[in-house]
Each structure stands twice: as structure tokens, then as C-alpha cells.
Image: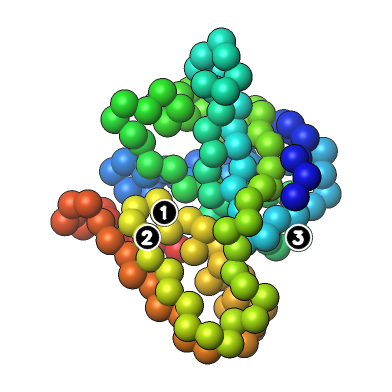
Amino acid sequence: MALQPWRKGTVIRTEDHTYNTRRFWIEVPELPSFDFIPGQFVTLDLPIHEKPNKRWRSYSIASWPDGSNVFELLIVLAEQGLGTHYLFNEIKVGSEISFRGAQGVFILPENLDREIFLICTGTGIAPFRSMVNYIHLHKTAFKNIHMIFGCRKKRISCTMKN
């Protein structure tokens, strides 16, 4: 898979999802459609360090391909995370973000005529959310899909909204 070029995205919406999780919708103005396969990720280049490889943070795409030039990220605030603190404290609607992607091969098999097990915790649900919604919206035939979702702590805010 070829390395994607760096692009500029504009944050068009944010929403607090839980006490420490935020959703970010990013539009890619230069493209009529941001194409990706459910399960792929983007890499953000955040201004948090001088060295590029210390600025890059990768996040799974939580939305599903809908033909638009917008994608959604679901990000948890890491206590010691420079990247997530920057995103939560500095990024607002209208902010520009440099990113590369979509990338990755963590995607559904072409033939879903087998048992599929999706196991995750917290925001690890993002690629599975993309996959399951894509399957539902495209009425893709499948055998069985099992999802096991865990939370670190028992809190009401751990429940996931669509």
C-alpha cells in the first residue's frame, strides 16, 4: 500500500462523548471525497515537538465511508499524552490539522461468511464502529459478528453513543 501524501483538514465539529473522550469531524477541502476502507487510520502531525516522528499520532477512523470528504475520529484524553492534550486544549472548530492517510490493513475480510470476533476497550471501538456501520448500511451479507467491549472503570459515561 503506497504512503499517502500529507493533507490539510479542517475541524468542522467536535463533541464530548464521555468525560474523557471527544469526537472530531475533519473535512478535507481539497478532495471531493475522502476515500478509505473501514478499519483504516490517519496519522496527525501535531505541533508538539521539533522532530517529526515525535509529533505524529495515529488514530483509527470512527466513521464509515459515505462518499463525503469528512471523516470522524474518536479520541481519549491520555493523562500523559502530549498529542491528546494538544487536541483537547488547542483544537477547536475551524482549526487546521495536517494528516496523512487513510492507511492500514486492519480491515474486514472480503468474505464475511465466517465468525467475526471484534474485541476492544474504550476508543479501540473506533475501527469496529466503522466496520459494523458500513456492513449495516450496505446490507453486506455476513455469518455472525460478535463484539466484546470493555471499560477500564465502571462509570455511566462508559456507554457508547452512535
Which is closer to the viewer, label 3 or label 2? 2
**Quarter of image, res 118:** bottom left
Q: Residue at x 56, y 67 (%)?
A: 131
119, above or below 92, in the image: below
Location of residue 17 in the rendering, given as x and y in whole percent from the top left corner: 38, 49
Q: Residue at x 50, y 17 (%)?
A: 48
Q: Is residue 157 left or right of residue 75?
A: left
Q: Which residue is mark 1?
A: 124
Sooner in the amino-acid sequence: mark 3 or mark 2: 3
Location of residue 32 in the rendering, given as x and y in whole percent from the top left corner: 83, 49
Secondary structure beneath dot 3 equals: loop
Q: Which residue is mark 2?
A: 120
**Quarter of image, res 119:** bottom left
Q: From where the camera sits, is residue 157 visible?
A: yes
Amino acid beneath label 2 = Cys
Q: Which numbered dot is residue 67?
A: 3
55, above or below 72, in the image: above
Farthest top residue in view = 50
